[in-house]
Amino acid sequence: MATALESPAPRPLTPVSRVLRACLHALLFGLLALAAGRAVTDSAPQAGRVVAACAVLAAVYAGGVLAPSVRRSPRAGAVWLAGLGAAWAALLVVSPDGLWIAFPLYFLELHLLRLRWGVAAVAVTACAAIGGFLAHAQSGAVSPGAFLGPLLGGAVAVATVLGYQALYRESERRRELIEELIATRAELAAAERNAGILAERERLAREIHDTLAQGLSSIQLLLRAAERSLAEAGPGGPSPDPGGPADPAGPRAAALAHIAQARGAAQENLAEARRFVRALTPPDLEHGSLAAALERLCTAAPGPRVRFCLSGAPRVLPTPYEVALLRIAQSALANVVRHARAARAEITLTFMDASVTLDVVDDGTGFDPSSAPSGEGGFGLPAMRSRAETLGGLFTVESAPGQGTAVAVTLPLPLEASR
């Protein structure tokens, strides 16, 4: 029912629309063939005129169906309907069978015209059909069906088209809703991908800052110490003259020790790099406890003397807790080595009934926490705070110029770990 029925910007026809369109064509051409056939078989006096009128009406209908302007322009559609009406009126004059052409015309008028004009056109068509039938009817042969048939047909056509339009509007609303849902789902998927990318980027940035950056800083300090030792040793070897220069074997041995430490730090950083790329547990935690890892961290730290203290009854912590505490300790101790110029530092791990606390204290130069820089690339203290807050913990920094620094993080223990 939709060919010559589409709006100026028609959508692709659905299978249902194609079937309705084919049914409309078949109905109109079938009725025309029936009218022409009856005129010929009954040897009606005006059989030639009936056949000619049917052919003209069929040609006008086919021309409108094939004309793109009828589908695109409401005015062209109205003109086409007027032509169809004139050709149909000519058929009504010569044949009473032209009455039945009114039914396909109802649907065309309702689809091509606005609703109020379409209903008016249906009413005029029904009246014309009744009038044409009365003009050909013999006296006494008129029955109520002659009036009710066209009127009921028009009413059924109006009800059918209104129902079809209501279903079409509902289908369009559902289609728009589905398109919105698809677009929203695509946006959510893109947002989740972006969030995942940002989370992974933040994870890698924190890991690089807390491992590779700190390890490279330690290697740099150790190599500088080795360089100073080699400079003190001088270019010559041990002197055989007891009264000659001092034996450089001591400084050179110190330099070799610093280089060995640097090589060890480089190997550890390589292992760390491989680990965080694969999102694995830090090597220090794979074969030991958090307390043992912190103790090794204090022993290997270059620069100030660092002591480790354990308080409370140790218990097994979830891996994310151990990783966060170890990384915070590494980052805080790296800040002590690089910036504090401290002589002593202490790392304390305290287990309590419902929480675990890590304290890193030094006697260095201190700083003003309110004006502290965020570190290279925006990490450092913010990264430590982010690690603690991600696990629902509390991160605090207490410091003042000339009074050292105390970094503390407290993590609430999960229920299974606090029992």
Image (cartoon, grey):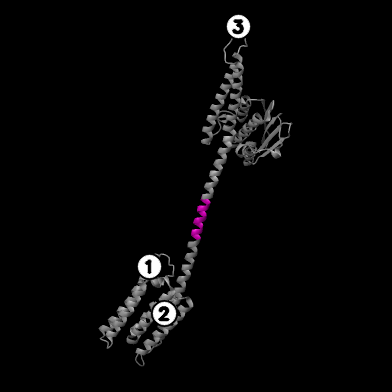
Q: Three-letter amino acid code at disc 2?
A: Gly
Q: Nearer the viewer, residue 140 or 194?
A: 194
- The mark closer to the camera, 2 or 3, is 3
Question: Picture coordinates of residue 134 (x, y %)?
Answer: 38, 89
232 to 206, vertically: above or below: above
Q: Three-letter amino acid code at disc 3?
A: Asp
Q: Which residue is mark 3?
A: 241
Q: How many C-alpha atoms fall within 10 Å of the one at disc 1: few (<14), some, or many (≥20)?
A: some
Q: Tell me the CA gap for discs 1 and 2.
A: 23 Å
Question: Picture coordinates of residue 58 (x, y %)?
Answer: 32, 77
Q: Three-letter amino acid code at disc 1?
A: Arg
Tag shown at residue 18: 1
What is the chief secondary structure element of the magenta stretch? helix
Question: Picture coordinates of residue 389 (x, y %)?
Answer: 64, 41
Asked whether the viewer can see residue 210, the reply is yes
The residue positioned farthest toward the bottom in the image shown: 139
Q: Earlier in the sequence, mark 1 or mark 2?
A: 1
**Quadrant (top left, top right, bottom left, bottom right) of the C terminus:** top right
389 to 38, vertically: above or below: above
- SS for dot 1: helix
Tag shown at residue 28: none
Asked whether the viewer can see residue 419, the reply is no
Q: Find residue 229 and report its image quarter.
A: top right
- Extent of the magenta region: 177-189
Q: Is residue 367 left or right of residue 239?
A: right
Q: Which residue is mark 2?
A: 153
Q: Tell me the CA gap for discs 2 and 3.
A: 132 Å
Q: Tell me the CA gap for discs 3 and 1.
A: 113 Å
